[in-house]
Amino acid sequence: MRRTADAVIVGGGCMGASVAYHLARLGVTRVTLVEREAQLATGSTGRNAGGVRHQFSHEANVRLSIESIALLQRFEEDVGTAIDFHQNGYLFLLSTEASVAAFRRSVELQRRLGVTVEWLGPDAAATLAPGLSVDGVAAATYCAADGIADPNGVTMGFARAARSLGVEIACDTEVTGIRVEGARVTGVETPRGSIATSLVVNAAGPWARRVGALAGLDIPIVPLRRHIFLAQPNTGGSWDDPGHVGAVPKNRVMVIDFDTSFYFHREGGRLLFGMGDPDETPGFDTSVRWDFLPRVTEVAIRRLPALADAAVSHAWAGLYEMTPDGMPVIGPCPNVSGFYTIAGFSGHGFQHSPAAGRVLADLVVGRDPGLDLTPFAFGRFAGAGQAGEANVV
Ligand SMILES: Cc1cc2nc3c(=O)[nH]c(=O)nc-3n(C[C@H](O)[C@H](O)[C@H](O)COP(=O)(O)OP(=O)(O)OC[C@H]3O[C@@H](n4cnc5c(N)ncnc54)[C@H](O)[C@@H]3O)c2cc1C
């Protein structure tokens, strides 16, 4: 492992890998990315649903989506790795007047920024997702350019490309200390020795608060468990087998029942689904709570009746990295010069990793990122607060 580096990135999920790639492209290659686990992408990145959408309520997030989706579309060409990106759209189902009113504002914003989003009645929504029940749905929105991609492919793609440009990747290595002298970062400590550096990037996802604390900072990011379930027909086999045709969508359209937060999409021959648990409390536990499944199923079969005859073949839980306003922290942290954070994406970080990593790399080298970063500033937590992201699913 290097003993001195121009930058040390803490965390090898999609964010750390994207920052490494974008720094290297700007010529900053004497960089070490330090990951505690034996492999990259085993934190939140390795447990997410792969969803990628333009349909956010906050302008800054829509802008991150536009840039990120453009990069995901040309990822194989530019970065050199296939990422299984399917743009079959996101369908948001809205059942309350309040949701419809809020989405009217969001759709207006998305369209103003050049995104094509459609308003649909319930019947039109049902034709986009065979098997869907639209009982009680008042309206829906659909953006055909939204989709599903492979989080592991994106992370490994960025990491491989960064490494080929000279970035060092040190797995099995935990950052246990950050040296700060005279309010400036001077290095990091690990069980494998220290690295002298004047620049640390905190890309530790749900653990970002702990890494911030090593530098004496309090970054308000809390971990919140979220479950994912995979279902197949209870006779075994795939939803593509004869007998199940039309019971669930054939393509990978992502359907989100906004008012319950239940969502699903096809994952190969299976169906991936999940839902937020309003009773979940912050913590690092990622064991599966099987007693939560019946609560999800109750909602799920109302929207997708085929799930009543399904068997859950796999389940896992991962951590959302929540901030108080559902917006990430991207940029420097005042009081400790040389300490940057890119974390707290509140459950939608995978899709924003391409643009967010580019923005952070620009900031590090002193380039204009071309984006108003006020909504992402660490300093906002000390003020009166801001209107954050409403479409946290
Ligand atoms: C169930 C679920 C579904 C989701 N679905 C979606 C989705 O559809 N679309 C989407 O965009 N997002 C989704 N997300 C959110 C997304 O997964 C995260 O926003 C994103 O992966 C965050 O990436 P990250 O690199 O910041 O964090 P992580 O992937 O968690 O990476 C942080 C890394 O830091 C390492 N680390 C921590 N402390 C240290 C230390 N001291 N030293 C060294 N290494 C350290 C960890 O081991 C970890 O590998 C989902 C999340 C979950 C849990």
Image: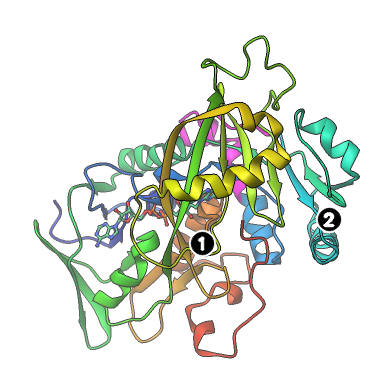
**Under 8 Å from ligand 1: the CB of mark 1?**
yes
Quarter assignment of residue 162: top left
Q: Is residue 181 left or right of residue 363?
A: left
Q: Nearer the viewer, residue 285 or 14?
A: 285
Q: Which residue in the structure is indicated by mark 2?
A: 111
Percent of width and height locating residue 343:
44, 64
Along the viewing direction, whichever of 60 and 46 lies nearer the viewer:
46
Is residue 365 visible from the viewing direction of this image?
no
Whole-percent x, y for residue 224 in the image? 44, 62
Q: Amino acid at mark 2?
A: Arg
Q: Which residue is mark 1?
A: 345
Q: Which quadrant is home to the C terminus?
A: bottom right
Circle number at residue 191: none
Question: Quick one: label 2 or label 1, which is nearer the N terminus?
Answer: 2
Residue 244 x %, y %: 67, 17
Q: Is residue 104 magenta?
A: no
Magenta region: which residues? 68-87
Inspect the image, locate mark 1, and give the three-letter code of the amino acid beneath it. Phe
* Residue sitting at x 45%, y 49%: 291
Q: In the structure shown, which secondary structural element does the residue marked by tag 2 occupy?
A: helix
Q: Is 85 covered by the magenta stretch?
A: yes
